[in-house]
Amino acid sequence: MISVFIVDDHPVVVEGIRSLLINEEGIYCAGHALTAAACSAWFNSNSADVILMDINLPDKSGIDLCAEIKNKKPKTQVLALSTLNQPSYIHKMIENGASGYILKNADKEELLSAIKDVAGGKTHLCMEALEVVKNSSNNPGGKPILTRREKEILILIADGLTNTQMSEKLFVSHWTVDSHRKSIMTKLNTKNTAMLIKYAHENGLL
């Protein structure tokens, strides 16, 4: 039986993952935390086989939390679950002890496969993460790499659609659109929509 602990600051994400795993044979959710501090406190007196860890946490980067947990619980495997696919994030998570990296657009089969792989001592990088790492050396300008979904949303943002309109057009939740929008702005280092569109036009992203 593989015990899984979830770390994500969005309760809806936590509940979504729990619902995917709750009836899965051989896997159970040991608990969850919405902050790095809560995760660290839980592992002071508990343990789990695998942690599904978001990188963007409100009180501490998942990159730093990964190193902390691996120091505290070396046998616990960390599987990064993020919207961010920049090479720097992937490399730093692996350097800090993560055994895998998958994106939040992964389907159930990908998630289960990743959990089982890292629990069994293997490394699991999703296809997009593998491509990003492989192509990072061919990206001399260092421009951020967007996922296919992020590119779609960027185009819709430039077209003036609201989050609600985008969620209806793409058949995804309002939260999913908001998460992708925040990821795009983080990657492109922009603080508002105007800056985002300006950067995208200047760098040929539209």
Image (cartoon, grey):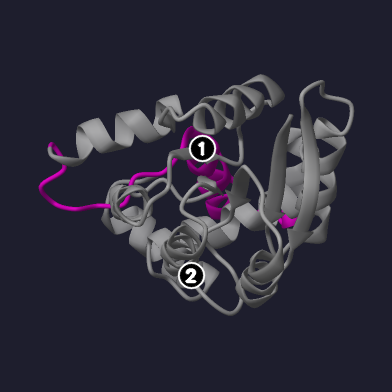
Q: Residue at x 76, y 50 (%)?
A: 13
189 or 18, which lies in front? 18
Residue 74 placement, left or right of 173 = left
Instruction: Work out whether 48 lies above or below 33.
Output: above
| Label 1 neighbour load within 10 Å: few <14, some 14-19, many 20+ | many
Is there any visible trace of residue 35 in the rendered image?
yes
Per the image, is 206 magenta?
no
**Amino acid type at mark 2:** Ser
Per the image, is 147 magenta?
yes
Residue 74 placement, left or right of 45 = left
**Amino acid type at mark 1:** Ile
Q: Position of residue 55 (x, y in %)?
A: 52, 59
7 or 122, which lies in front? 122
Q: Residue at x 48, y 70 (%)?
A: 61
Q: Quadrant of residue 129?
A: top left
Q: Position of residue 82 (x, y in %)?
A: 54, 49
First to last magenta residue range: 138-163
Instruction: Work out whether 191 lies above or below 158.
Output: below
The tag earlier along the polypeptide, 2 or 1, is: 2
Residue carrying label 1: 102
What label does residue 61 carry, if any? 2
Mark 1 and mark 2 in contact (Cβ < 8 Å)?
Answer: no
- SS at circle 2: loop
Structural distance between the alpha carbons of marks 2 and 1: 17 Å
Is there any visible trace of residue 160 in the rendered image?
no
Q: Quadrant of the C terminus?
A: top left
Q: Quadrant of the N terminus?
A: top right
Q: Position of residue 58 (x, y in %)?
A: 61, 76
| Count of picture labels | 2
Q: Quadrant of residue 200?
A: bottom left
